[in-house]
């Protein structure tokens, strides 16, 4: 149940980050007041493709986990798989690849967008068309199995959004891939149009406040265009990789909205005013039609 405002920390990619930068980041998070209720990571955890260099991927991940182990144990951490992470290996090192949890009355949804993008195209309730992205997938898994796994996650996500509509103060979704529509259908940084169309109305119906990604190097906040009769404008937020600009994102969860600020490591305030009701970071308007222990979890296995 929502009681008081709180903060969530978001990092984009953590691949190739120096020990000095990682240590400074963890120290800054540990010193924040009020203490964050969650640290979320939704960018690349390794510069190695685990399907091409499994040993390199494991070496990188062990290194990242050593640095992250210095995080205040009272701050839970979640992580989204990226395009370079094979599910079984990700599960071994980070746990489940998609799940949800309640944090202070807010439903936090973590998706495996690299898998979700392979879900079937639903043209009606009884008609599904299998669609596999051109993005590289594990050659040891056949197309039907990938589609089945993706469809299972898609159905689970629909259930989570329905639960969020009735049981949560807000909904926030963490994803690697972007949920904005791309003019270039071959750009693998974006989810396919049929996935976006399938879920965006459901997200708006569930009063989703933010979609937070880590696929791009730049930091930006964009208001998604209103959907149908919904007045809510979902904020689409991306946090660049920590190695790229040494910045982290602070999300302030308030009673009626979520606001977000991006800080360089040297500029992070020691104390945060949670009653600020606007984003300090510049928010772009929706694109025109021509543009293209307050925590409980809900397992993806249930």
Image (tube, rainbow, N blue to C red):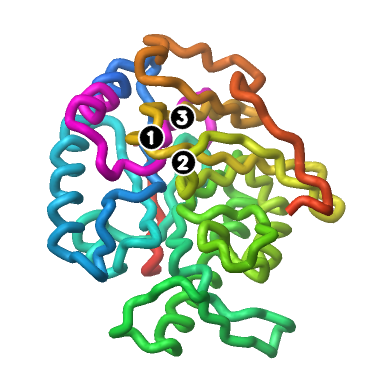
Front-lying residue, 189 or 203: 189
Residue hosting label 2: 217
Residue 224: mark: none
Front-lying residue, 37 or 104: 37
Residue 242 appears left or right of 188: left
Could you tell me which residue is drawn at 34 percent across and 61 percent down?
A: 84
- In the rendered image of this protein, does residue 185 appear above or below residue 149? above
- Sort mark 1 into few (<14), some (14-19) or many (20+) by Cα contacts within 10 Å: some
Residue hosting label 1: 244
Could you tell me which residue is drawn at 44 percent across and 69 percent down?
A: 115
Residue 85, image x, y percentages: 31, 62
- In the rendered image of this protein, does residue 32 appear above or below residue 21? above
- In the rendered image of this protein, does residue 178 appear above or below residue 140? above
Quadrant of the rendered image containing residue 162: bottom right
| Residue 108 in sight from this viewpoint | no
Find the distance from the CA under tag 2 to the CA under tag 1. Answer: 7 Å
Q: Are marks 2 and 1 in contact (CB under 8 Å)?
A: yes
Dot 3: element: strand
Residue 253 appears left or right of 11: right
Residue 28, image x, y percentages: 30, 19
Dot 2: element: loop
Residue 249: mark: 3
Residue range of the region highlighted in magenta in the rendering: 1-26
Quadrant of the rendered image containing residue 53: bottom left
Could you tell me which residue is drawn at 25 percent across and 42 percent down?
A: 16
Sequence-earlier tag: 2 or 1: 2
Residue 21 appears left or right of 174: left
């Amino acid at each position: 149940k929502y009681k008081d405002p709180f903060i969530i920390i978001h990092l984009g990619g953590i691949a190739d980050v120096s020990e000095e930068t990682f240590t400074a980041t963890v120290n800054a998070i540990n010193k924040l007041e009020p203490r964050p209720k969650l640290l979320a990571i939704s960018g690349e955890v390794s510069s190695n493709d685990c399907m091409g260099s499994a040993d390199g991927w494991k070496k990188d991940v062990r290194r990242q986990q050593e640095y992250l182990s210095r995080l205040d144990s009272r701050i839970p951490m979640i992580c989204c798989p990226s395009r370079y992470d094979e599910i079984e290996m990700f599960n071994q090192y980070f746990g489940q690849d998609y799940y949800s949890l309640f944090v202070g009355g807010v439903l936090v949804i973590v998706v495996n967008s690299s898998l979700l993008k392979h879900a079937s195209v639903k043209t009606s309730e009884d008609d599904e068309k299998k669609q596999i992205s051109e993005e590289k997938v594990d050659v040891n898994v056949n197309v039907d199995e990938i589609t089945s796994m993706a469809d299972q996650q898609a159905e689970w996500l629909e259930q989570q959004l329905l639960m969020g509509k009735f049981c949560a103060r807000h909904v926030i979704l963490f994803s690697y891939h972007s949920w904005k529509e791309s003019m270039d259908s071959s750009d693998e940084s974006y989810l396919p149009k049929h996935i976006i169309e399938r879920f965006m109305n459901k997200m708006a119906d569930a009063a989703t406040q933010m979609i937070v990604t880590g696929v791009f190097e730049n930091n930006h906040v964009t208001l998604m265009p209103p959907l149908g009769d919904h007045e809510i404008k979902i904020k689409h937020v991306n946090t660049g990789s920590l190695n790229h600009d040494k910045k982290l994102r602070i999300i302030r969860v308030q009673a009626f909205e979520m606001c977000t600020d991006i800080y360089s490591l040297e500029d992070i305030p020691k104390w945060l005013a949670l009653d600020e009701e606007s984003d300090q970071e510049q928010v772009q308007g929706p694109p025109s039609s021509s543009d293209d222990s307050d925590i409980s979890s809900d397992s993806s296995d249930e």
